[in-house]
């Protein structure tokens, strides 16, 4: 699909990668960008329309979809990360539920709510923001990784089903980016703007998966090797 003249709905578009997607879509000629945000403000950016959205709330998702019936590209970006101290901690269960509510069920809710809209508007596309952590898990981010693995699985099923209505589904996998989510982690980080650009360029080229940085490509490539990264994931500082 082409970004020129598209109407893009992005969850969590007030900061981080979501905001970068909004800016990059406008740069590439999107006609309108709906920024799905939990707390709309009076900020008025030309081309960007704020829409109240909490992806963990089915009624909020339904209201946003009803308001944005001209959407042609849905970007499931909203996500949270929480650290668990050990996978053996009992609180890990509640923390997993909280993360899944946003990263996994939120992605399902929005995809379901917008599927008919996309079909009615000619097919369009869905971009699901996943992670390199789709394919490996560190103990401290085990719940987060599980949510992204689950969202990857859903993305793969969604892609097959939505082909019937001519909707493209792209999974975006990326390692550390320079956003609030990674504040305090002393790691090499990619710029969110570069990642958004790679995803939109990939979508326009007909790709169904974009691996936005070299480490993510390494992780996926290693999966079926004896030195698979998921067997010995790198530590984070
Ligand atoms: N940063 C990384 O290194 C990295 C790496 C791989 C993948 N990712 C993924 O990239 C995506 C964007 O992350 P980011 O780095 O930009 O994080 P971020 O800077 O923390 O921004 C997260 C965004 O998600 C929104 N959000 C969270 N829960 C929501 C909810 N229930 N309903 C609606 N919006 C909600 C936040 O809104 P509020 O402002 O209201 O909190 C915020 O706009 C996420 O899916 C994340 O898992 C990030």
Image: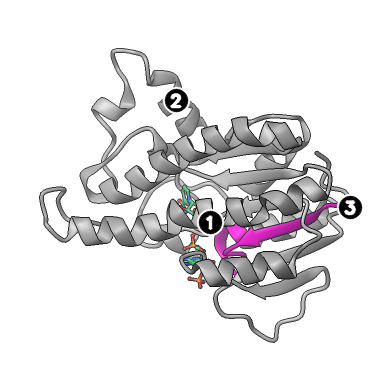
- Specify few, some or many for label 1: CA neighbours under 10 Å numbering under 14, 14-19, or 20 or more: many
How far apart marks 1 and 2 lie (CA) works out to 27 Å
Tag 3: Cα neighbours inside 10 Å, few (<14), some, or many (≥20)?
some
| Left or right relative to 128: residue 227 | left
Q: In the picture provided, is 161 more to the left or to the right than 173?
A: right
Some atom of ligand 1 lies within 8 Å of the CB belonging to the residue at label 3? no
Quadrant in which residue 69 is drawn:
bottom right
Label 2: which residue? Answer: 220
Residue position marked by numbered label 1 in the rendering: 109
Cα distance between the residues tagged 3 and 2: 34 Å
10 drawn magenta: yes
Is residue 204 on the magenta stretch? no
Q: CA distance from mark 3 to mark 1?
A: 26 Å
Question: Which region is colored magenta?
Answer: 6-18
Label 2 element class: helix
Which quadrant holds the N terminus?
Answer: top right
């Amino acid at each position: 699909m082409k970004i020129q003249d598209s109407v893009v709905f992005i969850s969590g578009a007030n900061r981080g990668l979501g905001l970068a997607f909004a800016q990059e879509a406008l740069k590439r000629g999107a006609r309108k960008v709906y920024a799905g945000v939990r707390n709309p403000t009076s900020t008025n950016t030309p081309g960007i329309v704020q829409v109240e959205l909490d992806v963990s709330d089915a009624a909020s998702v339904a209201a946003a979809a009803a308001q944005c019936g001209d959407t042609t590209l849905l970007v499931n970006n909203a996500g949270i990360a929480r650290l668990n101290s050990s996978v053996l901690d009992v609180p890990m269960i509640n923390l997993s539920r909280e993360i899944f509510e946003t990263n996994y069920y939120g992605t399902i809710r929005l995809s379901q709510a917008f599927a008919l809209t996309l079909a009615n508007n000619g097919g369009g596309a869905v971009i699901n923001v996943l992670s390199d952590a789709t394919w490996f898990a560190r103990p401290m981010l085990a719940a987060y990784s599980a949510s992204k693995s689950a969202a990857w699985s859903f993305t793969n099923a969604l892609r097959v089903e939505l082909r019937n209505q001519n909707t493209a589904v792209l999974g975006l996998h990326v390692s550390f980016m320079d956003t609030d989510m990674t504040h305090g982690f002393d790691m090499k980080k990619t710029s969110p703007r570069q990642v958004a650009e790679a995803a939109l360029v990939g979508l326009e080229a007909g790709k169904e998966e974009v691996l936005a940085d070299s480490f993510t490509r390494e992780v996926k490539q290693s999966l079926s090797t004896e030195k698979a990264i998921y067997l010995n994931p790198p530590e984070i500082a």
